[in-house]
């Protein structure tokens, strides 16, 4: 009897944990790779874009299992936000009543307009190399090969 | 006083229990701490509420800088760094730095930033390195000369990745500046995006950039941030599979090259000796780096001729 109620309590707790982790979240970075397994050695099965809304089914360490935009797999949780990110511009953006806790307006605040304004008054500051360095992007396969060739053996296959 | 001390101790214990790592926001810390302290009867519910409120107010300002805004702040901070230090136009050396750095960043607690992590060598003999918000990272040729192995270079990059991951740059923005910027932002969303708001916002932006660059390039971060970055660097090295003694190795070299009253790291960082003593607490006694021959060979090939 006692064992039965214990099992029931455990089941309830598990269900509660599952319910708590199932949530809609937004991608808060320019691009987020989706992987087949919760690890950086996991194969990339797709890419999500800024503002994409997805369902988080469960989390494992720092990884979230997601589904949405026709993709399912694992995303590192640092790419996700509980806020809804509204991709809108100009007047439309201004009309959205922003309550900061639940909503973030993409392009609001310090943005490309502010950068342009800054550049106009600081002509000595050159962004050429900043743009150039942003283009240097190492593909997952190159990272994996680099570790392997250098005999660098990651613990548990990636960030936790 | 004693009560507050106990509350802090309990907060720290609660954090340790919760398994939270290196750079948690103030908001989270107060939330957990105040709750536990209240349950254990160390502080009254009113006191707990006030600790929580103060903590959340500070935490919220950081939460309100979205990764996208952090990215724009980082771009201009980076451009300002390059206004003082010339970039080294060496494609293969910069590529090697990015392969190593971007690979390491995946093992940090915050592998995904808005624009990702990117690395560049600065053409100066000064021993220096900077991490702009969002993950634009700059390392001087003088600093590269202090690295005798890929493991040592990995330690330098991991330390800078940790500064970016923990948002130490953003934390250098003066509280008042942040408050006024956020007030403008709140008003902006309610009204149309007029030129007046853009001008005010740009002013707050300029101020934020100079707060960050002044701290990064002139005064240095608080010692606690440097300790956090060293500790997080060791975690990154261990997760990735590099020898964490890479950090003590590069600090030992820096000790030989830095003049105590010199520019760069000598001015902005605690002395290498004191950092070695701190780092030894989590990597054990200092011993030489063990780097396989194949790794050493590619390191020499990539940076040996700089």
Image (tube, helix red, strand yellow):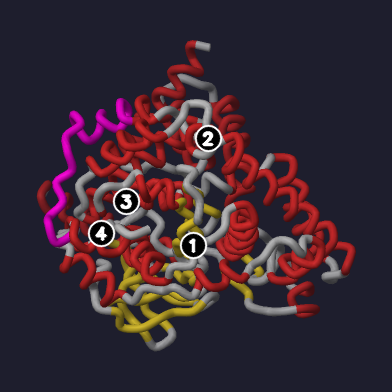
Tell me which label, 2 or 3, sits earlier in the chain: 3
- The disc label shown at residue B299, or none: 4
Report whether mark 2 lies on the same chain as mark 3.
Answer: yes
Of tags 4 and 2, the one toward the viewer is 4
Give the vertical position of A7 relative to B8 (above or below): below
From the viewer's perspective, is B11 left or right of B206? left
Q: Quadrant of residue B258?
A: top left
Give the vertical position of A115 relative to B28 (above or below): below
Q: Give the Cα separation between the discs numbered 3 and 1.
A: 17 Å
Q: Quick check: is B286 in the magenta stretch?
A: yes
What segment carries the magenta color? B276-295
- The disc label shown at residue B88, or none: 1
Q: Give the Cα separation between the discs numbered 1 and 2.
A: 22 Å
Q: Quadrant of residue B295?
A: bottom left
Tell me which label, 4 or 3, sits earlier in the chain: 3
Of tags 1 and 2, the one toward the viewer is 1
From the viewer's perspective, is A2 left or right of B71? left
The local secondary structure at tag 1 comes to loop
Q: Residue at x 49, y 67 (%)?
A: B89
Report whether mark 1 lies on the same chain as mark 4.
Answer: yes
Report whether mark 4 lies on the same chain as mark 2.
Answer: yes
Disc 3 residue crowd, few under 14, some 14–19, many 20+, Cα 10 Å: many
Tell me which label, 1 or 4, sits earlier in the chain: 1
């Amino acid at each position: 009897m006692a064992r039965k109620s214990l099992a029931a309590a455990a089941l309830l707790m598990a269900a509660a944990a599952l319910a708590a982790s199932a949530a809609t979240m937004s991608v808060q970075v320019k691009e987020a790779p989706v992987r087949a397994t919760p690890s950086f050695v996991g194969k990339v099965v797709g890419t999500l874009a800024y503002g994409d809304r997805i369902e988080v089914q469960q989390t494992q360490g720092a990884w979230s299992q997601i589904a949405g935009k026709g993709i399912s797999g694992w995303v590192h949780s640092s790419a996700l936000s509980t806020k809804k990110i509204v991709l809108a511009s100009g007047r439309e953006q201004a009309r959205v009543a922003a309550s900061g806790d639940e909503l973030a307006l993409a392009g609001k605040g310090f943005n490309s307009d502010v950068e342009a304004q800054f550049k106009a008054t600081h002509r000595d500051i050159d962004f050429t190399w900043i743009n150039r360095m942003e283009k240097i992007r190492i593909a997952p396969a190159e990272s994996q090969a680099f570790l392997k060739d250098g005999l660098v053996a990651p613990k548990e296959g990636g960030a936790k | 006083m004693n009560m507050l001390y106990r509350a802090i101790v309990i907060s720290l214990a609660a954090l340790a229990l919760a398994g939270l790592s290196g750079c948690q926001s103030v908001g989270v810390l107060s939330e957990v701490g105040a709750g536990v302290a209240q349950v254990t009867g160390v502080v009254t519910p009113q006191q707990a509420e006030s600790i929580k409120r103060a903590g959340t107010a500070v935490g919220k300002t950081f939460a309100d800088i979205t990764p996208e805004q952090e990215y724009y702040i980082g771009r201009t901070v980076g451009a300002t760094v390059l206004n003082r230090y010339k970039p080294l136009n060496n494609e293969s050396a910069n590529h090697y730095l990015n392969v190593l750095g971007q690979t390491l960043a995946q093992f940090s607690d915050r592998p995904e930033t808005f624009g990702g992590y990117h690395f560049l060598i600065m053409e100066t003999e000064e021993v220096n390195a900077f991490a702009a918000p969002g993950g634009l990272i700059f390392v001087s040729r003088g600093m590269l000369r202090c690295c005798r192995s890929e493991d040592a270079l990995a330690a330098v990059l991991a330390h800078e990745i940790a500064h970016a991951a923990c948002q130490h740059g953003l934390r250098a923005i003066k509280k008042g500046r942040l408050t006024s910027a956020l007030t403008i932002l709140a008003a902006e969303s309610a009204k149309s995006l007029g030129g007046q708001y853009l001008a005010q916002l740009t002013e707050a932006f300029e101020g934020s950039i100079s707060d960050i660059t002044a701290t990064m390039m002139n005064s240095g971060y608080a010692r606690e941030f440097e300790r956090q970055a060293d500790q997080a660097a060791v975690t990154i090295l261990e997760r990735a599979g590099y020898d964490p003694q890479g950090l003590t190795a590069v600090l030992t070299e820096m000790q030989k090259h830095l003049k105590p009253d010199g520019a760069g790291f000598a001015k902005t960082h605690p002395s290498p000796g004191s950092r070695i003593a701190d780092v030894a607490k989590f990597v054990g006694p200092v011993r030489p780096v063990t780097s396989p021959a194949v790794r050493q060979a590619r390191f020499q090939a990539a940076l040996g001729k700089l």
